[in-house]
Image (cartoon, helix red, strand yellow):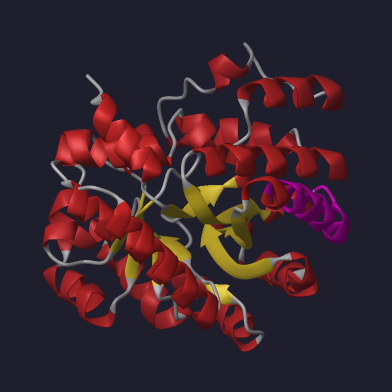
Amino acid sequence: MVDADLENWIRQLPKVELHVHLEGSIRPQTLTELAAKNGVDLPGGVTAIYQFSDFSGFLDAYMRCAACLCTQGDFERVTYEFLLDQAALGIHYCEVFLSSMQHLRRDFDFDCLMQGIQAGYRQARSETGIRMGVIFDHGRQFGAQEGLRVLERAIGTRKFGVIGLSIGGDEVNFPPELFEEMFLRARQAGLRVTAHAGEVRGPESVWGAIHKLGVRRIGHGIHAIQDPDLMAYLQQQRIYLDICPTSNVRTGAVPSLNEHPVRRLFDAGVPLTISSDDPALFQTNLVQEYLLLAQHFGFDRRELQQLSLNGVRASFLPEQERAELQARFQQALTALVV
């Protein structure tokens, strides 16, 4: 049973979301309309494609969602709606992943694509004040050479709000080491970097992302729990894990919620942030993820406040803007009764 008072408190809690994919955040009604407009098959409709039971089923659903985005106007609409939904949850800033290869494979003009995203962002920001940065997320399974093409698009569209680069996708067969050159060039170009690692593979994947890719923030990283030395290193070096509990259960990265290591990682001092990953596909949102931490894992309100501030500290905002946002959060948290 949901504690209404707690849910209301979490909604008022100022929040940042750092690990959320645009293509996995499309409103169901919008997805239905875009699929019909653009001739994309959704077998059984939106509700049916959301009923996947494993990671391959999730990827199929995700790619169908991405295929529904075919025009600049499509990207504008889903970005605008996504940010309105984020702002309604008490999210002040988010860093959204764009699955770049899904659109590069279709020869999509990235200036056009990002102009659409920026138009949606400008409208949402004017109405709500929410802020956003865009991270190009490269699917490992497409290889390192294609990753360099993605990097070119990221560098070329920085004027439209692209701030970073990531790798996701098939972690099992494509370790971080394959993308060392791509990440070196990204850092040299001034892009911020992160990587999905330790989601379905073990601690070696997280170590590789840190030492070979130079990341200071890890997407998921839950299997770091298997290596005490790694957990100590993450704590000492203040390398953040972006944790997405519902996602990890729905994709099978953990067998069940009871086996999720978020509480143990937090108690060990590993710096964590909380995100929803693909809120539409996983039928969740950031408020629900915070509720889950409180009601299932026993996080109290002061610990939830700490996670909120962690989101600011781990963000890719410029240093001065990050400090200003942290000051505003701390002032808001002081006024929020625990």
Judged left or right of residue 209, residue 132 is: right
Residue 112 inside the magenta-drawn segment:
yes
Q: Is residue 6 visible?
A: yes
Q: Residue 34 is drawn in which quadrant?
A: top right
Residue 308 inside the magenta-drawn segment:
no
Q: Name the residue: 22% across, 19% down.
A: 1
Q: Up-down: is 218 above or below 79?
A: below
In this rendered view, identify the residue nearer to me: 139 or 166: 166
Q: Up-down: is 135 above or below 292?
A: below
**Residue furthest front in the image:** 335
Q: Name the residue: 22% across, 35% down.
A: 257
Q: Name the residue: 70% across, 26% down.
A: 30
What secondary structure prevails in the magenta region?
helix
Q: Residue 222 is drawn in which quadrant?
A: bottom left
In this rendered view, identify the residue nearer to me: 129 or 105: 129
Q: Residue 311 is drawn in which quadrant?
A: bottom left
Q: Is residue 221 visible?
A: no
Per the rendered image, the range of residues in magenta is 106-124
**Residue furthest bottom in the image:** 188
In this rendered view, identify the residue nearer to me: 279 or 317: 317
